[in-house]
Amino acid sequence: MRLLIVEDEAELASALARGLRREGHAVDTALTATDAEFKLVANGYDLVLLDWNLPDGSGIEICRGMNSGSLEIFSGEKPRVLMLTARDDVDDRVLGLDAGADDYLVKPFAFVELAARVRALLRREDGGGPILTVDGLSLDPARFVVAQDDQSLDLTAKEFSLLHYFMAHPGIVLSQEHLLEHVWDEMADPFTNVVRVTVSNLRKKLVDPTVIETVPGRGYRLAAS
Amino acid sequence: MSFVRSIRFRLSVLYSSVVFLLGGAILGVAYYFMRRNLRRLPLIYDSRVTMINGRPIVIRDIDVDTAQLVEQAITQRALDLLADYSVAALVVLFLLSLIVGWVIAGRALRPVTQMTAVARDIQASDLSRRISYAGPEDEMSRLAGTFDEMLERLDGAFHAQRRFLADTSHDLRTPLAVIRSNIDVLAADPDATLLEWQEAGGIVQRNAERMAVMIDDLLAAARLEVRAAAMVTVDLADLVTETSVELGPRAAEIGVSLEARAQPGRIEGVPHSLRRAVANLVDNALKAAPANTSVLLGSGTTGDWAWVKVTDAGEGIDPAAVETPGRKGLGLSIVREIAEAHGGRLVAHRGAKGGTAMVIWLPTGPHPGQLPDGVPGSSVD
């Protein structure tokens, strides 16, 4: 899943990015509202972690912009929004949630709580429970455990994220560009065949590699009965 | 019987008792004189001619003794009747005055009942309600007005305190969040390298320092209240000169020139706090100013107001942000507190070509006129 952290404290943004990458997410950061809006237009995100007070604007305005459509988000799919702010007034929380945020976390917070909320928000997107299951596959994002036909699989972080994304969208054809957009961060080079290589590595580790089908000319699909 | 312990009850009992006593006294006096004069000056006292209703009557025709007996009986009867009716009238008067007194006292005391209800409704968290008494100009309206003024002051103080607390907690939470997240993320990662831990150490150090500065500012704000009584005459020009000498070297370090243009501005104030306020403004300006620009520090007097102005060539802040909690450092919050404690104001102006002019306005006398519009001393720039 691809995340954008909008936070003007660079030292906070980089720590969160590091932690969430370890959780298996592709993470970009933006230190200003302008940068955040640019990235939201240019890249497809599944979740945005949004600070309220930014040096050149406010997270609330970005949130409203995404909802009203005045900010033209990449491919029109509005990402989930988790407000991350030091404002803890009940009024502020209500204002944040009413502006379109899906969740609200007050600084300072424990990183494990943030990670759990991120998982929960992405789960809402999957529409499933804490453990994803598709046919014989089961994947637990919180514990980094994945198994096929009750046989545990040993995947790299990227392979795990890729399989997670496939399992969150079962039966849907996902193009290489789409996968690059949602599983890799902005550091990935769009002109490499990194997606093809990772898919092929993932297939080799699966007990039944045929669950990931190649749809010629269009991309890949996780077979779902 | 709770109504017995009300002013309304006591007032109406007092009214009717007074009416009863006065009525009783008047009737009693009337009865006494009537009786005395009827007995002392009878119509029939011997067998001469007596005028009754303008008609002469000669008593000789009847026996004088008998006539006197009859007159006495008539007199006595009239007196008895008068006494009976007087007592009955007094009782009715007493009851009527009790009812009228109850009604009048209720009307007069109605605003008090209203005020009690409003005062009971007002909670510490919501001081926005007012009595807004709409009666004629009298004791009650003055009482309600005084009460409203007191609520206004309480409300203002409460809001200032809340705004200050919101600023403070926001500003303390941010470095705390930086420290906590860095440590949390590294502690959860067994592969974290020594270099990463060393970097985190630096981050913790810097943010702990930031928090220490904020706590100093908080203490300064608390001290301001304690020392508010010790007002002396201060010339803002001296303050401006001192600050520019003090902070000049630090400005030079970051490639910013600090220029002072001190004109006299004499006010009554707390020198220590005012120095801190000016230093905070210059501090903010230096942070905002790009390299190779200058920060202007000026002072002067416009009408009833003396001012200190700090201008930078930075990105410029939203003037409204000065009023919004959390949109600025605790430093500015302290400046505003200090300005307001001196009866003045902190106003931000965004320059036409970017940059910010922060102005502290301070009254030169006890009853200053309207605060001047715009940026003071612009012709000097």
Image (cartoon, coloured by chain):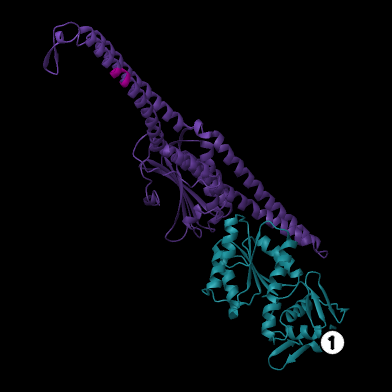
* Left or right position of B183 against B373: right
Q: Which chain is purple?
A: B
Q: Is residue B330 above or below residue A213?
A: above
Callout 1 amino acid: Asp
Q: Secondary structure at mark 1?
A: loop
Instruction: Find chain A in the image and tell me its colour.
Output: cyan
Q: Nearer the viewer, residue A144 or A93?
A: A93
Residue A222, position in %: x, y? 75, 86
The residue carrying mark 1 is: A208
- The reply to whether the magenta stretch includes residue B78 is yes
Quarter containing the N terminus of chain B: top right
SS majority, magenta: helix
* Left or right position of B338 against B100: right
Q: Residue at x 55, y 38 (%)?
A: B224
Which stretch appears magenta?
A: B77-81
Q: Nearer the viewer, residue A51 or B372?
A: A51
Label 1: chain letter: A
- The reply to whether the magenta stretch includes residue B308 is no
Residue B266 seen in this snapshot: no
